Amino acid sequence: MSETKKLTYIDGLKGTGALIVYLCHFAYAFYFALYSLNPANSHTAGNVEVAIGKTPLNILYNGNFAVQLFFVASGFVLCIRYFQDHDRKRLAKSAAKRYFRLAGPILLVSTVIFFLMKAGLYQNTEAAALAGSTDWFAGFNNFEPGYSHALREALFGCFLFGHNYFNGVLWTVKYLFLGALLVYALAAVCGQWKYRYGVYAILLLALLRTDYAGLLLGYIFCDLMYTKPDFMKKLAKIPGLWLVTLVLGIYFGSYPSIGTNLEGSMYGFLPVLSVLYHRIGAALIVLAVLLSERLQRFFGGQDAAGRNEAKASGEDFLLTSHKRKKSGEGLFVRLGKISFSWYLVHFPVIAVFSSAFLLRFYGLMNYHVLMLINFVLTTVIVWVISAAMTKWVEQPWNRLLNKIWK
């Protein structure tokens, strides 16, 4: 647990969350029955979407679960360095940079969205009418844009109040910002206190029904990993514990977000507490990954595989991990590295490009063929924009902030 390098499988979990959110928004926009579980919204014979939506397969596009997964993974990485060196000054610098780190990319994307709206390129309302998703997709960006409004939302509205009029995903920024400040403060005040776990428990109970709980859970997992490694190793050695934890995480994480029309399904007997189930599911899956090197490798954890190689060869672990990193990274890790940009840009691309594509070619070919082509093209566009934004905007911006707060 002494490695200073960022754990790549945590990047992989963040990438997984970003991918699922994208799949969620594309599915809800064009195959709304996957969410509504209403046969009237179905595009397939036999209402296949409804059947899928009532099974654990819906975890593949369950956006609420994915956001919780992103919160837990983000909470984990916030204080890794602190639990290694207990440097409170580093915490203060991280807290000071947090707003600016998030605000730069958000402001850029919000500005682009404003111009797209002014140009009349948002066609999600018209596309929703064809796709049968009017109850959800049609409501976004359906107002006359003003740049002062976009600025207010990007610079403080989303941070303090969760405003998301221009970019629907910005409601999460409130928790990524204020939740991070909470975690930094918690680490600074009681991160080395003997009885801090009692404080964690009380705070977790108080926040369990809020989205701050995800970041807090990730922070607690990080504390345990770095200050109680023997305890985590004992858990990891319990036969089958990681698998049971994973299965339970998938079950709770795949609870249908709609919370209705679940009669006869494996979720029908549960009270309707969708977000709480998703939060529990995300925490269990992250815990399962922390307990299993197999899952760490699956999510792109070269560090876990490198640890095994180092044990076998006698090489230094960090050197082995570095060699492996040069040989390539997994899909989830690559997504994790561009996850923030991906998260910010994917919905505007769906509302503009994917909607226009549907409107242009609707009726000229089979709906499912049309949407397959649409999905492939949309994915490529989102990936290219996200990678470019990460390289040319996010990374230089973060380097500048690091120099300012050096």
Image: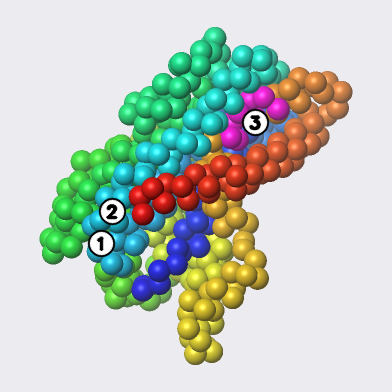
Q: Secondary structure at mark 3?
A: helix
Q: CA distance from mark 3 to mark 2?
A: 36 Å
> How many numbered marks, from 0 up?
3
Q: Main secondary structure of the magenta part?
A: helix
Please give left or right for residue 358 compared with residue 69 in the image.
Answer: right
Q: CA distance from mark 2 to mark 1?
A: 7 Å
Badge 3 vs badge 1, beta-carbon distance below 8 Å: no
Indicate the amino acid at tag 2.
Answer: Leu
Q: Is residue 348 above or below residue 6?
A: above
Upstream in sequence: badge 3 or badge 2? 2
| Range covered by the magenta-colored residues | 345-353
Residue 279 visible (yes or no): no
Q: Secondary structure at mark 2?
A: helix
Q: Position of residue 24 (x, y in %)?
A: 57, 36
Residue 337 visible (yes or no): yes
Mark number for residue 289?
Answer: none
Would you name the residue on which mark 3 appears? Answer: 349
User: In the image, what residue occupies the spot 40% across and 39% down?
Assistant: 100
Would you name the residue on which mark 2 appears? Answer: 91
Would you name the residue on which mark 1 appears? Answer: 87
Q: CA distance from mark 3 to mark 1?
A: 41 Å
Question: Which part of the image, by quadrant, shows the N terminus?
Answer: bottom left
